[in-house]
Image: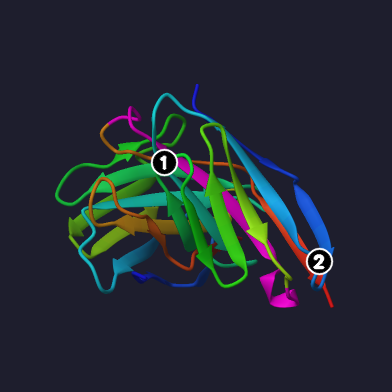
Amino acid sequence: EDQVTQSPEALRLQEGESSSLNCSYTVSGLRGLFWYRQDPGKGPEFLFTLYSAGEEKEKERLKATLTKKESFLHITAPKPEDSATYLCAVQAVYGGSQGNLIFGKGTKLSVKP
Amino acid sequence: GAVVSQHPSWVICKSGTSVKIECRSLDFQATTMFWYRQFPKQSLMLMATSNEGSKATYEQGVEKDKFLINHASLTLSTLTVTSAHPEDSSFYICSARDSHFSEQYFGPGTRLTVT
C-alpha cells in the first residue's frame, strides 16, 4: 500500500536554528514527490516537486532533497514567518488514471523569535 | 505559480439546506480538479476527482448524492453539499492541475459551518 509518513509531527525552533523535516514514503513507482506549506485556515501553497533520487531544489531558506526512500526539507536560519505546517505528498506512477496525491499528516513548524 | 480561487471563503447555513462552493483556475486550464476535506489538525482527505466534461470519481465512503460535483468547463468546478447537517461542517479545499503529470495547485479553502 502506498504510504507517506512525516516526522516529527511538531517542531519548535528558535529563530536562526537550522533543522530538517523528514518525509518517508513507500510507493509502487514514484512519479513525483511534492512539498507544500499550509498556514492555518488556508489552502496548501506549492513549494517543490522532486522526481528522481539525488534531485535537490532550493527556495530562499528551504532546500528539498530526495532519496529512494525519503525526502528532507532543510530549513536554514529560519524566521518566525516560516512557521506553518509543511505537507509532503507523493504521486505514484501506477496510482490509476487520476494520479492522485497521497499526503502525509504534516509537520507543524513553530519558529520563535 | 498558478492561481486557484474558491468562493465563498466561508459560509454558514442551516441544517437541511444546500450550499454550493465554486473553484476556479484563474490563469490555466484545469483538465483535472480535486476536492478535499480537512478536519482540524488533520491532513487533507481526498473526496473526489473530476475531469472536465466527465462525471466525478468519488473516493470510498464519500456519498456522491450528498456531495455533488460539476466540472462544466476547464476553469470551473463546483461542489454542492446537499441537505447539509452539522457533521458536514469542515474546511473544503479544491485543487487543480493542467495535465496528468503537472503540479497540483490548491485554492484557499472554504470554511463551512452548518447550524
Please report, as a chain letter, where disc 1 is located.
Answer: A
Is label 2 on the same chain as label 1?
yes
Report the amino acid beneath label 2: Glu
Residue B38: percent from left, percent from top: 57, 51
**Where residue A10 sits: x, y (%)?**
78, 52
Choose between B17 and B80: the one closer to the eye: B80
Q: For the view shown, which residue lies furthest in the front direction?
A: A54
Q: Residues within 10 Å of mark 1 (few under 14, many from 20)?
A: some
| As drawn, B57 above or below A75 | above
Mark sitting on residue A17: 2
Give residue A72's position: percent from left, percent from top: 62, 48
Specify the segment rendered in magenta. Answer: A79-96
Q: Disc 2 sits on a residue from what chain?
A: A
Identify the disc placed on residue A52: 1
> As displayed, is residue A80 above or below residue B76?
below
Tell me, yes or no, if residue B41 can be seen here.
no
Kindly identify the residue that appears in the image at 38 percent across and 40 percent down: A100
Q: Nearer the viewer, residue B78 or B103?
A: B103
